[in-house]
Amino acid sequence: SQQGEEDPQALSIQEGENATMNCSYKTSINNLQWYRQNSGRGLVHLILIRSNEREKHSGRLRVTLDTSKKSSSLLITASRAADTASYFCATGLRYQLIWGAGTKLIIKP
Amino acid sequence: EAGVVQSPRYKIIEKKQPVAFWCNPISGHNTLYWYRQNLGQGPELLIRYENEEAVDDSQLPKDRFSAERLKGVDSTLKIQPAELGDSAVYLCASNPPRHGGELFFGEGSRLTVL
């Protein structure tokens, strides 16, 4: 079963613009993670935010978490062609990690 | 440091044939996961190992799927017999003991059943 739901399902923007994707979930969590998957490749961990954190930054990435609304957002600033990929959120509770269906991001040159 | 290694990367078989996938996790990672990812979907857990013990195999279709991790290092996932609906990417991931939660994934094994 998939707990996380990403929104939008697909996003196409111009290079240099910011990209925002959202994740909603249904139950309590210990942490929420974001991963990137390039076409035909494995998933790569981007950032983890714990349930007691509200915002976290890593380079051009900014993640927010609102546990009252059971939602998270991933912001990629100053997008590049290499950011073209699918982005997945995964919610963690103890040793379980439940995944959403992903947002497909296309950066147009 | 070498990452998670999976083989084969691609496999095409006829339905009812057997198939096996192999995974070698990162050295020192005692937790190993097998996931299945259908096209356009997120990964779905098939089985999780802590060392050589399968601690969560509730989502593994045990009538045709089996897995082993005999020495607590590398692992094999087998499907016998394969069905058309088994076409997917099979992902292996690992993480070290008492880790915060980040998973390290291999490149996956793409299975096509004809």
Image: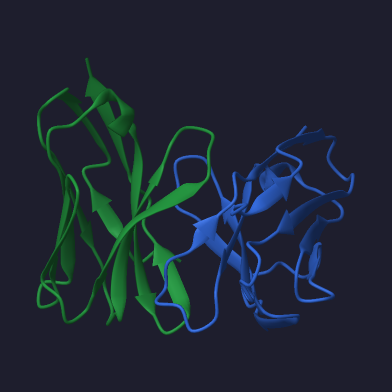
Q: Residue B16: x percent and y percent?
A: 88, 45
Q: Please give the name of the residue rendered at 85% of the width and 35% of the height, measured from the top-left corner.
A: B14
Most foreground residue, B31 or B76:
B31
In the image, is residue B111 above or below residue B18?
Answer: above
Instruction: Tell me which colouring the rendered structure shows.
Output: by chain
| Screen quadrant of the N terminus of chain B | bottom right
Most foreground residue, B35 or A51:
A51
Q: Please give the name of the residue rendered at 70% of the width and 38% of the height, measured from the top-left corner.
A: B9
Q: Residue furthest right?
A: B17
| Screen quadrant of the C terminus of chain B | top right
Q: How many marks?
A: 0
Q: Residue A38: x percent and y percent?
A: 43, 36
Q: Which chain is blue?
A: B
Q: Residue B97: x percent and y percent?
A: 54, 81
In the image, is residue B112 above or below residue A46?
Answer: above
Q: Please give the name of the residue rendered at 36% of the width and 57% of the height, measured from the top-left corner.
A: A100
Q: Residue A3: x percent and y percent?
A: 35, 67
Quarter of the image where one finds residue A29:
bottom left
Most foreground residue, B63 or B10:
B10
Q: Residue furthest front?
A: B1
Q: Using residue B38 as the reference point, say whether residue A45 is left or right of it.
A: left
Q: Please give the name of the residue rendered at 28% of the width and 79% of the height, measured from the top-left corner.
A: A27
Q: Residue furthest top?
A: A109
User: What shade does chain A have?
Assistant: green
Quarter of the image where one finds residue B32:
bottom right
